Image (cartoon, coloured by chain):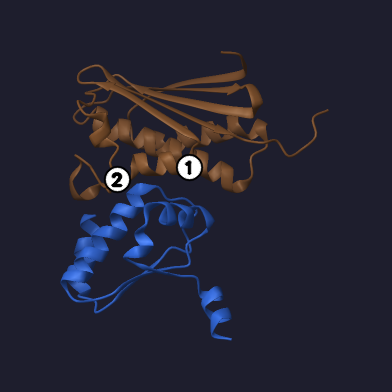
Chain colours: A brown, B blue
Amino acid sequence: MKFENYLKLEFPSKSSNEALARSMVGVFASQLDPSMEELGDLKTAVSEAVTNAIVHAYPNTLGRISIRCRILEENRLEIVIRDWGVGMADVEQARQPLFTTGGEERSGMGFTIMESFMDSLTVKSRPGAGTTVVMKRRLPRRRVER
Amino acid sequence: MREIDAILDRMLPVDCAIDLSGLSFMDSSGIALILRIYRRMQLAGGRTVVINPAAQPLRVLDASGIANLVRIVTTVKERANEV
């Protein structure tokens, strides 16, 4: 797939890295001149995916999380968030609104919000082999390119 | 979550207003907190209202559907509706 630019990040599954991850993706996305609302949507979707990896992929340890952003044709932003943690046996069940394995402290709305704020969302996971979340959103440019 | 429970245990409010005016960003973990407060207040027969969410938190509240359970109030808008 052709891409115009990319960014790769890797960081440990520490809670303090949620804000870092969404800020970094926001900075990368800014080259597409998103509106404040679009930027907020992207950062929220990233926050949800990264939080899932921190809370669910590595419940009792610190693990590796990677993010790859690419600007594809027609101003589409692709964000891939990957972990090598516990994985999920039933992705469809996990994507149901309000479903969570995290108890009362979790809302179970993470995937619902990612689906609402991005144009597309695919989730691949296998128990013991981690999870890969791929999100895409088209950001029509507003300013004229020079 | 434990702090919220401790505050509710101590104050035993009749109703609860959650002021989000100082919050610039919220994800679904904030929804979990609001749901927790809502369920506690519902058990006690009280109401829960969210006050003055900024634009991004409001989008998350809308996407979650929590407005079906909890009233969301923006004070300027409410005043305009009263006029």
Q: Which residue is mark 2?
A: A97
Q: Position of residue A70 (x, y in %)?
A: 56, 22
A78 lies left or right of A126: right
Q: Quadrant of the C terminus of chain A?
A: top right
Looking at the image, residue B24 sits to the left or right of residue B10; the answer is: right
Q: Position of residue A19 (x, y in %)?
A: 44, 39
Taking the image as shown, residue A31 lies to the left or right of residue B10, namely right
Inter-mark Cα distance, 2 to 1: 15 Å
The residue indicated by pointer 1 is A117
Q: Quadrant where the N terminus of chain A lies?
A: top right
Which residue is located at x 21 percent, y 64 percent? B39
Disc on the earlier residue, 2 or 1: 2
Residue type at mark 2 is Pro
Task: Label 1, secondary structure: give it.
Answer: helix
What subunit carries mark 2?
A: A
Q: Is residue B56 above or below residue B6?
A: above
Callout 1: chain: A
